[in-house]
Amino acid sequence: MTPHPIARWCLAAVLAGAAPLAVLAQDAGEHNPADLEKAFPKKAPYSPYAGRNYPTRPLFGDTHLHTAFSMDAGTFGARLTPADAFRFAAGAEVTSSSGQPVKLSRPLDFLVVADHSDGFGFFPLVVSGAPAVMSDPQGKKWHDMIAAGQGADAALDIIRNFAAGKMPKAIFPVPGTATYRDAWQKAIQAAEGANEPGRFTAFIGYEWTSNVGGGGNNLHRNVVFRDDASKASQVEPYTTIKPLGSDDPVELWKWMAAFEQKTGGDVLAIAHNGNLSNGLMFPTVETFAGGKVDRPYAEERSKWERLYEVTQTKGTGEAHPFLSPNDEFADFELWDKANLDGTQVKTKEMLQFEYARQALKNGLILEQKLGVNPYKFGMVGSTDSHNGLAAVEEENFFGKTAPQEPSAERLAKAFFVDPKTGVKVMDWEVGASGYAAVWATENTREAIFDAMERRETYATTGSRMAVRFFGGWDFEAKDAHDRMPARVGYVKGVPMGGDLAKAPAGKAPSFLVAALKDPIGANLDRIQVVKGWLDAKGEVHEQVYDVAWSGGRKPDPKTGKVPSVGSSVDVANATWTNTIGAPELIAVWKDPAFDPAQRAFYYARVIEIPTPRWTAYDVKYFGNKPEPGTRMTITERAYTSPIWYTPN
Amino acid sequence: MRALLREPLVHFLALGALLFLFFEWRGGAAGPGSTRIVVTPGLVQHLASGFARTWQRPPTREELKGLVDEHVKEEIATREAAAMGLDRDDTVIRRRLRQKLEFLVEDEAAPAPPTEADLRGWLERHPQAFQAEPRTALRQVFVSVQRRGAAAGAEAQRLLGRLRTAGPGASIAELGDPSMLPAELPLGPVSEVARTFGPDFAQGVAAAPTGQWSGPVTSSYGLHLVLVTERVTPPLPALADVRQLVEREVLAERRKAQIEALYTRLLGKYTVTIEMPEEQPQPASSSPGAGAR
């Protein structure tokens, strides 16, 4: 049983700047009924397409995928290149690193290949036996080991050397060297070659992989370019290794600003895995580097980090049962034992600085104090897979790394073990999650990027359900019966990621929320609205409301909670039936406890009926026996970006 | 005789004879099996330029000597290993040799560019490979099984009757049950239909007539009455538009055929006997080549 300490050394990345945000901070409070009538006439125009300038279908993609160009991915056997990764995401069948044919059930709409900026392209260099590598004794040794079929030993040796800071300088690619530039150019060219506006969007990007506090506290960010090669080629990714790079996000933001200034380009950064940061992802007083969480920090962070990756293979970080004891759905695909490499055990005090919901709440406190909310982020999910395959459907899960691709052994292997701390994470705990859904007006780099900046996005744990969420002051019950809910939504309110202000006297915000199941997926159990708010005493609270659900279930009169939908899963055969749940749910919900003087946010969470988890498909296919405690079912879900209410 | 003098084969043989005489005069061939190793100025230059490519500077005297020594050692090792037959059972070497042989043949395929007629013929024989995806536009009226249960089927039939009476121009804005599903899909690739409504619905639409309400078609959401308003099967693209793609395919095919021909030719020189283990079924034919493909 070989642990793969992939996380032990993640690499850093580079990059650049998010654009100034033209966010749709609409003020829904100023509508009056006469205006509404005009904007939303009773009779639609004859042409059903006229006036439809809003997005009509969510685009699904992955903002965080690694290929053989990532040092850790390559050492553990990933052989697929960025070009392969784009082909696969666009729907082509490819042969995986372990030699298995694989294809997605349907193409994705977009992909960001985000290889680690530290050591960018190192592994293909070693495998190909480039002259520079072969003339270095260490490089030649590794090449020969891999050529002789001892790739795993080579990987461990490379990792030991990297961890000890002993990578041979002559061959380790750092920005400014020819090998580094070459690899970055290859990555850019792969995206340029795969980008097909209108059909499939291939973004240029990279991951800046900051690990602090001795190496395992995860502060990673993915940097995404709105631009093409002409601008991205003018820079090389930002790394974490001094003096060229830094492990402090504040420095990354400076790099992003410099990129935008130099090229007129546009970049954004998406942080992930706060759950593995051991209390460092969402600071409220001081950053790990000793910087203050003050107004400039809040301004920069909210400018560059418009989205947060809330679910991926290494756990889901929306909520934690310790922080949200009344949320019976909070205990979902958690990774809360330690930091990224298991070198530091988790304590309960760290959790409040790691999970998205708590960060959104703390953001309200900070906004009150600083005037700017550093944690005003939207939600996306992504894979963080390290084998070039954005394959996170439960029945088609190709693992996080090449050794985790389907095999009879993967259910029994450890992802990593730290003998000192005793922390052990099994491969079965890796989640088949997630995707980013974006309400973009068209499938292009520009439109998707702009939708990300206005946070009109939601995260899914791998399902492709369509979710709408609008907030305003005038939604009424009958809007839920409208045949074009999106049109009503945009006319009367703001979409997910937007803002509400200037509450009309006596009115509470109302929300139009709708969800349509994945066309080939499971029915829906319920839609919930999660509210967080800051009270007059300066304390934050949260409440989860069930707002739409399937069947005639009656909410518990005391708690208001809707009882469980039940389960139709047959674990042994890895099947389920859509005999429970609903294919579509829609509701208008009005906040029953609104106080116009209090800051608040609202987001929707959509939950599917239980389905077999990837582990069940494994057992069915390989006929092996899962370890005791292995989870065999899952309730896939979607988390929308919040809508914020800010008092005048 | 004049024709003979122009024959390349004659040039080749004459050149070979001269080389043979030359090496005889120099004292023994320098090829594999001989004990003579000659490092020519050209080779030294080649080694030095390889070094310079990597290090962006020429090698020093010391380094150059090291490169030459390495080369001599490699040459000796290769000859000795070959003499001992070490290359014979080595899968990597065998594959590499096979690859080199096949490359030689493939190269022969490249120089003659395919003619216009070759390309046109290929395009006509393989239209699917170059055709754009068919496009479909449709309207649909949704009947929710979730809402109506067993009565959904009857409701769908009732609506179908109304729609057929009203015809393709029927106003559907207020018909059927409300849903987030689009009531109309503008002309787009057929794959978009499956992406929005699922594969069952896409199959139903593929079978539906054009310009006439039909159904109900079943999807995982419920029942749908469908009107396919338009179907476009893109015409076969003109050769000029896909010339490069076609050329690539033709050349790839030619290479494959060339390699096939090579083995067919060479197999004639060999007698292949295949002895399968007892419990395995016997190959159907024992003619040469049966086991080599």
Image (cartoon, rainbow, N blue to C red):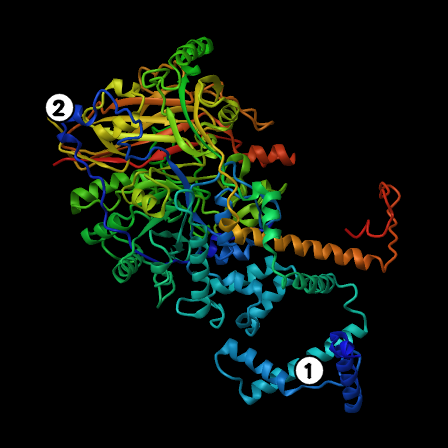
Q: Is residue B227 left or right of residue A625?
A: left
Residue B236 seen from this side? yes
Q: Position of residue B61 (x, y in %)?
A: 56, 89
Q: Is residue A551 left or right of residue B280?
A: left
Residue type, numbered disc 1:
Val
Q: Is residue B181 above or below residue A625?
A: above
Secondary structure state at the residue bearing disc 2: helix
Residue type, numbered disc 2:
Ala
Secondary structure state at the residue bearing disc 1: helix
Q: Is residue A640 left or right of residue A76?
A: left
Residue A544 seen from this side? no
Local crowd size for mark 1, using a 10 Å CA cut-off: few (<14), some (14–19), many (≥20): some
Q: Position of residue A450 (x, y in %)?
A: 29, 45
Q: Is residue A176 left or right of residue A171?
A: left
Local crowd size for mark 2, using a 10 Å CA cut-off: few (<14), some (14–19), many (≥20): few
The residue that disc 1 covers is B72
Q: Is residue B67 above or below residue A536?
A: below
Residue at 60% in and 27% down: A572
The residue that disc 2 covers is A34
Instruction: Give the CA separation, mark 1 to mark 2.
Output: 93 Å
Q: Chain of mark 1?
A: B
Rendered-image quadrant of the C terminus of chain A:
top left
